[in-house]
């Protein structure tokens, strides 16, 4: 009997030890990590994110072709494509920076620079970026280069930039007996056209704007820039949007929403919603960069390319003083070897910075049925810009006249305010209140938001 | 006794033999409980890796700052920073408002639904499934459904109100700031619908454990329905009620997904919660995301919940 008990106790002990061992093995399995890139014997492999996934078939096909061609031209380099859409999800991006698990060559927004540098995850690529490795270097838009440079140190290469304008639904303009070749340029004209479009009925609204996901503050910044205002003082210490240009923007929005009823009662909208409304033919106008049309409204939301056009940002005078400007770039992981950095620069130069090749291969885009001829990105200046424009004009498939007033405005890119996302976060509730509260006190809202932003700037 | 004497140092001459005796007993004790310790170690390792280490790390990070890849001590700077953020107090106000409303609505409704189900003689099983069904829906799907219901232009609720000639509402987008706000009530309705099934089943289980004789005796004494609830049901389910109360307060203070989905990313100030703010600090401020401030706010929330839980344990121990 006692032997049986002893045996049972022994079994229990063995079971316990096995359980612990199993847990240990599981923990070991969980903690094992894989290395994504290596170099040796002269061969170098680099992982690059923001490769278009198969759900975007044309872009995916073109990327795959480019990788194959590049690897053929550079047999010692292997590109490990990481399919991501959208290219950056802020939560994942931040977590990867903390963990140091970003790809060798990783996509960032212009506004990410300080976060990446603070995380200590960006490699200094200054010595490798020369006129020899990037022939168009001197022609890259200086404001785009500023976004990847700190002091005199270069941490990345820009691949796209934008300013914003007023996207219009030409089909609805025509139905409302408005002239789609002359998009409105002042807030008064926007309100008038929005009213006419809303009168079409069937759940169609003339104008839309964001007030969630930090996008409300983002749009407000651009609208203030166009109206001649400033979001933050030049020394970056105080909020400056509590001014006549800021008030005029909010007043125009409030009037359209509650007096004219030319904005939908459904508000608290974030990026992605207005594009859907535009594609469905339910929205007349909203503010965006041109890529909303060719990256979202047409390919993702099913809009028809000829239904859209674009004018400059609305402003008090009809000529926008400026526009919020931004863009994206690729940076290099701190752990990259010099050979990987060199290979990455070579790839970016091939795919993103050479007219006629990669993203600027307009002839191929035309052959693939992709709409060609949009006015952005305007990544280059000087001779490179001239050459790129010639190639663009040669392959254009869209009616570029639909964008002529936007192009003619030559909006000045004003960048984004200091602590941009924190500022936008504070302004989302202001936009929301203006678009949901018929009795919104604009002056009080702006004054309160301004003191909050000044506080945020002082904190940082 | 022997190990006590050795520990006290009172038996110096025979301390070695005493130590070996004590060691032998300890060894036997350990061997006897080896399997228990083995199983315990697994849990301890899991807790250590996935709970205690992150908590310790969070506390450490809340006193640090990282700039240009270099982490240094920042003292109380992260705490000062979050206390100076105007959204901080708004988030706490909203969280407390949600907690109180969720207690009033989300605590009472499942209890009364459970009583109702318990009293039913027919179709009890079907109704139980119906009540529990929303719990099986992924929270994101349930909330997206409510986001559609609440849409001021196209939503189901406003259509119904219009159909019966009642004034419509902007629901979760309502700008009013008088507590309880319409926006927060909308969030609480969605949260209650999503979560009440679980609490109802627990209450139902507790109700079914109440001996029927107690109700019979109460009925013989002339007790009505409310009197029976007050004098039999509530006292008999007091333990379950108080446990769920504590769990619900801790859970509702950590409200996140409801505000996040119903307000398109937790934006605005009408329903932003403390956990939404932590998320914004850590992840949503692209370019300015700050784990250290997020950690500081996480520590503050943890302390508040720890004080509440401690108070609850102390109070419940005192009573039992």
Image (tube, rainbow, N blue to C red):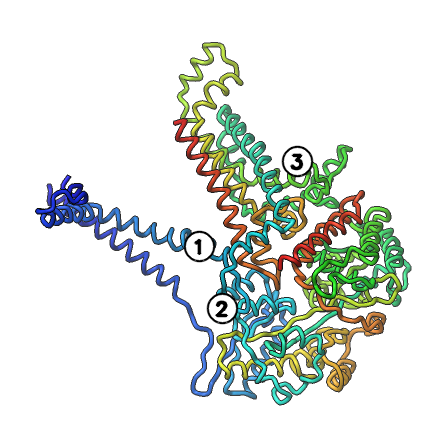
Q: Report the Cα–Cα distance between label 3 and label 1.
A: 35 Å
Rendered image quadrant of residue A166: bottom right
Separation of residues labelled 2 and 3 (CA atoms): 45 Å
The chain under label 3 reads B
Viewer-closest of A405 and B277: B277
Secondary structure found at label 1: helix
Image quadrant for the C terminus of chain A? bottom right
Circle 1 residues within 10 Å: few <14, some 14–19, many ≥20? few
Chain to which mark 1 belongs? B
Residue B228 in picture, x, y percent from top left = 49, 18
Q: Is residue B75 left or right of residue B314?
A: right
Query: Seen in the image, is B298 located left or right of residue A409?
Result: left
> Which of the pair A205/A41 is nearer the observer?
A41
Name above or below for residue A256 compared with residue A74: above
Mark 2 Cα-neighbour bin, 10 Å: few <14, some 14–19, many ≥20: some
- Residue B78 appears in the rendering: yes
Q: Residue B180 carries which label?
A: 3
Residue A137 against residue A102 in the figure, above or below: below
Quickly name the residue at label 2: A101
Percent position of residue B129, x then y: 51, 36
Number of marks: 3
Quadrant assignment, res A376: bottom right
Residue underneath mark 1: B54
Pair 3/1: label in front: 1
Tell me which numbered mark, 3 or 1, is placed earlier along the sequence.
1
Residue at the image position 15 percent from the left and 41 percent from the top: B5
Q: Please tell me if label 1 and label 2 are on a single chain.
A: no
């Amino acid at each position: 009997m006692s032997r049986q008990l002893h045996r049972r106790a022994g079994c229990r002990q063995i079971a316990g030890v096995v359980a612990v061992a199993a847990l240990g093995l599981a923990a070991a399995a969980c903690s094992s990590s894989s290395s994504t890139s290596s170099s040796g014997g002269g061969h170098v492999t680099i992982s690059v994110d923001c490769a278009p996934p198969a759900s975007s078939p044309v872009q995916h096909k073109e990327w795959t072709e480019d990788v194959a061609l590049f690897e053929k031209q550079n047999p010692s380099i292997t590109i490990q494509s990481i399919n991501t859409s959208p290219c950056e999800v802020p939560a994942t991006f931040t977590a990867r920076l903390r963990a140091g698990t970003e790809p060798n060559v990783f996509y960032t927004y212009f506004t990410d620079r300080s976060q990446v540098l603070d995380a200590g995850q960006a490699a200094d690529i200054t010595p490798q970026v020369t006129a020899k490795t990037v022939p168009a270097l001197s022609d890259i838009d200086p404001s785009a280069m500023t976004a990847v440079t700190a002091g005199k140190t270069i941490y990345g290469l820009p691949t796209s930039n934008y300013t914003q304008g007023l996207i219009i639904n030409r089909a609805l303009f025509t139905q409302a007996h408005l002239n789609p070749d002359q998009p409105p340029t002042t807030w008064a004209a926007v309100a008038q056209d929005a009213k006419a479009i809303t009168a079409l009925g069937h759940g169609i609204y003339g104008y839309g704007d964001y007030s969630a996901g930090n996008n409300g503050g983002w749009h407000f910044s651009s609208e203030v820039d166009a109206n001649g205002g400033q979001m933050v003082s030049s020394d970056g210490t105080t909020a400056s949007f509590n001014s006549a240009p800021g008030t005029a923007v909010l007043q125009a929005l409030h009037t359209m929403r509650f007096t004219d009823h030319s904005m939908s009662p459904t508000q608290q909208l974030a990026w992605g919603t207005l594009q859907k409304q535009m594609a469905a033919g339910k929205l007349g106008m909203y503010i965006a960069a041109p890529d909303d049309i060719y990256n979202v409204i047409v390919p993702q939301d099913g809009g028809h390319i000829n239904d859209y056009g674009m004018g400059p940002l609305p402003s008090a005078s009809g000529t926008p003083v400026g526009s919020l400007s931004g863009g994206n770039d690729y940076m290099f992981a701190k752990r990259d070897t010099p050979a990987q950095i060199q290979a990455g620069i070579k790839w970016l130069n091939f795919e993103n910075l050479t007219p006629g090749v990669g993203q600027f291969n307009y002839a191929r885009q035309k052959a693939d049925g992709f709409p060609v001829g949009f006015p952005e990105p305007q990544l280059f200046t000087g001779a490179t810009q001239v050459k790129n424009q010639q190639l663009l004009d040669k392959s254009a498939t869209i009616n570029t006249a639909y964008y002529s007033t936007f192009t003619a405005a030559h909006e000045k890119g004003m960048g984004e305010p200091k602590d941009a996302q924190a500022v936008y976060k504070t302004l989302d509730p202001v936009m929301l209140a203006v678009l949901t509260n018929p009795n919104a006190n604009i002056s009080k809202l702006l004054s309160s938001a301004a003191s909050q932003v000044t506080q945020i700037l002082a904190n940082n | 006794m022997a190990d006590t004497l050795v520990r006290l140092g009172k038996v110096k001459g025979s301390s070695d033999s005493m130590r070996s005796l004590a060691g032998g007993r300890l060894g036997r004790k350990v061997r006897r409980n080896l399997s228990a310790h083995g199983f315990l170690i697994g849990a301890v390792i899991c807790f250590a890796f996935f709970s205690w280490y992150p908590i310790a790390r969070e506390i450490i990070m809340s006193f640090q700052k990282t700039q240009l890849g270099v982490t240094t001590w920042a003292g109380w700077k992260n705490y000062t920073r979050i206390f100076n953020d105007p959204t901080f107090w708004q988030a706490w106000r909203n969280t407390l408002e949600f907690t109180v409303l969720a207690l009033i609505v989300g605590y009472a409704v499942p209890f009364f639904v459970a009583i109702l189900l318990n009293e039913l003689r027919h179709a009890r099983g079907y109704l139980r499934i119906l009540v529990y069904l929303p719990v099986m829906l992924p929270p994101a799907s349930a909330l997206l459904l409510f986001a559609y219901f609440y849409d001021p232009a196209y939503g189901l609720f406003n259509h119904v109100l219009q159909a019966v000639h009642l004034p419509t509402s902007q629901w979760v987008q309502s700008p009013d700031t008088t507590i309880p706000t319409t926006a927060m009530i909308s969030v609480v309705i969605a949260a209650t619908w999503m979560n009440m099934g679980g609490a109802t089943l627990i209450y139902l289980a507790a109700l079914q454990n109440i001996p029927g004789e107690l109700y019979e005796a109460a009925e013989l004494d002339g007790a009505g329905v409310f009197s029976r609830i007050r004098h039999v049901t509530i006292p008999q389910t007091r333990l379950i009620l108080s446990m769920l109360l504590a769990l619900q307060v801790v859970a509702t203070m950590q409200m996140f997904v409801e505000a996040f989905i119903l307000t398109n990313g937790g934006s605005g100030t009408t329903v932003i919660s403390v956990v939404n703010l932590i998320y914004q600090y850590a992840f949503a401020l692209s370019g300015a995301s700050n784990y250290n401030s997020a950690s500081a706010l996480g520590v503050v929330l943890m302390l508040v919940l720890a004080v509440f839980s401690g108070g609850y344990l102390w109070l419940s121990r005192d009573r039992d």
